[in-house]
Every structure is written in structure tokens, then in C-alpha cells.
Amino acid sequence: MSRRPPGRRGAPGRSGAPEHRDQAPKGLGGEQVEGRHAVRELLTVGRRKVRTVYVSNAVEVAEVIDEIIELAGATVRMVPPEKLAMIAKSDSHQGVVALTTPLPSADLDELLTASDAFIVAIDGVTDPGNLGAILRSAAAFGATGVVLPRHRSARITPAVTKAAAGAVEHLAIAPVSGIASAVERAARHGVWTVGLAADGATDIDRLAVADASVMVVVGSEGRGLSRLVEQRCDVIARIPIVATTESLNASVAAAIACHEIARKRRETNH
């Protein structure tokens, strides 16, 4: 399916008006990475400069630990577990903590103009575990970018990078002032926007625009999509579930939606 032209629902008439661009901060956070898989991916991808990798000298022998020590080289510092506990900002560091440069910020308009745009926008998810899991699913199913609001959302903390298991090293993440404005900008670029809601009118596995340039919008754990975001989305899609289950966790819903879009795109390309 081809892109829908600008000017659809949610896109105000601003023909000829200059495009607003969010002034992105220098980084998204993520300077401290904790957990074996997250640190290994940080070192393997090499997108960011690593300053120090702390490894507990009491950690059990494991192949992944040997790999981390080899990849980190001169940046490794073997420390007692009690010192690592003082450095760590989560309880699930698995004996490994890395200090690095912040994650780079992507530009939303560049994400929206990509020919294969498949973007996941996160509307108010505040739980670090859920945010990390959403980022992990987005990377696993081939999303070309993620959009995060600067406020009223979990930030890229050590708990998020741990839950994401290294996915943040592969994703282009664009910080924006608000998801509603990002949805509006998607409309101007001809990108379909699909909000996820339990009462959506379209089943996610029957989404006709999945193989087009698309932005999937995931709502918060409690209230779901904000009113303004839901009003501006082109399609509100639901994930069919049995009646005995009230709703799905935000990260699970995001994973299913990303899987369905990836599946539809594979079928279209074959």
C-alpha cells in the first residue's frame, strides 16, 4: 500500500508553513548500562564510547563474562561485589556495570521520511521494565525508530537498558515534546498512525496499512492512549483476546503489534 498523502485526519491546514522541529537534547541518557547482555551489546555494537566496565571479582565463571572482559580490554575494572553494589543503580546488574556516553538523539523528521518507516511511539509509559521491553520488541521486529516524549515517560535508565537487553544500541530514538504533535507531524509526512487500544475498531492482524510507512502508538500502562493522541491517530487497532482477560500489559501489546506488522511486511515482500 502506498503512503497516504498529507492532509488527512489530524493534520491541520498548514500548507507552506515552516516545519517545526524539536530541539533535541544532546543525549537521551543511558550513560550507565547494567546487566550482562546489555553491556555485551554496548561493547559489540561500538556506537558509543565506553569509559569503564566494572566487573565483580566474585562473579561466577560464564562465557558472556569472558566475552565482556575481552571486548572491554583496558576499560575493565575488577572490583569487589560490595563496591559494584555501590556503583550500580539497580538490583539486577548481574555483576557488570558499564559507564559510557549518552545515547544519541535521532531526528523525528528523518525517521518519518525514510522509505521503509516503521516507528514505535510510546505515549506515557512510566514503568522502566515496560519501556525496556517495548524497546527490545521494537528492535527485534525491525522497527526503524522509536519516539519518546521528554516528559511523563520513563527515561533511559539502567533499569531500562537492562530490560532492553542491548536493544537501545540498535535503535534510533527521537525525543519529542509530545506524542500528539509527533502524530500530527507523521500525518504531514504521509505516515499512517496506528494507536493501540482494547476497544479499537480494527483487529491488529487485519491492519491494511501494515506494509505502508507506519507509526504504531503504544499507550501507558493504566490509562492507555491520551485523548488527544487517540483523536489524531488514523486507525485505532485492538489485539483480540479472550473475554476472561481484561487487557494486555503495554509491553506485550507492543510486541504483538510489532510482530504483526513485521509479518505483514514479510508477506508483502515475498
Image: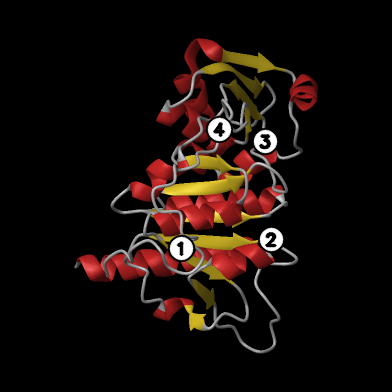
Distance between mark 1 and mark 2 Cα atoms: 17 Å
Q: Amino acid at mark 4?
A: Gln
The residue that label 3 is drawn on is: 158
Q: Amino acid at mark 2?
A: Ser
Write down the quadrant of residue 160 in the picture: top right
Which mark lies nearer to you, 2 or 4? 4
Which residue is nearer to you in this view: 73 or 250? 250
Disc on res. 268: none
Q: Earlier in the sequence, mark 2 or mark 4?
A: 4
Answer yes or no: is residue 225 visible.
Answer: no
Distance between mark 1 and mark 4 Cα atoms: 28 Å
Disc on res. 220: 2
Residue shown at the point (72%, 52%) measured from the top left? 127
Which residue is nearer to you in this view: 265 or 72? 265
Residue shown at the point (45%, 50%) measured from the top left? 139
Q: Earlier in the sequence, mark 4 or mark 3?
A: 4
Q: Earlier in the sequence, mark 2 or mark 3?
A: 3
Which mark lies nearer to you, 3 or 1? 1
Which mark lies nearer to you, 1 or 4? 4
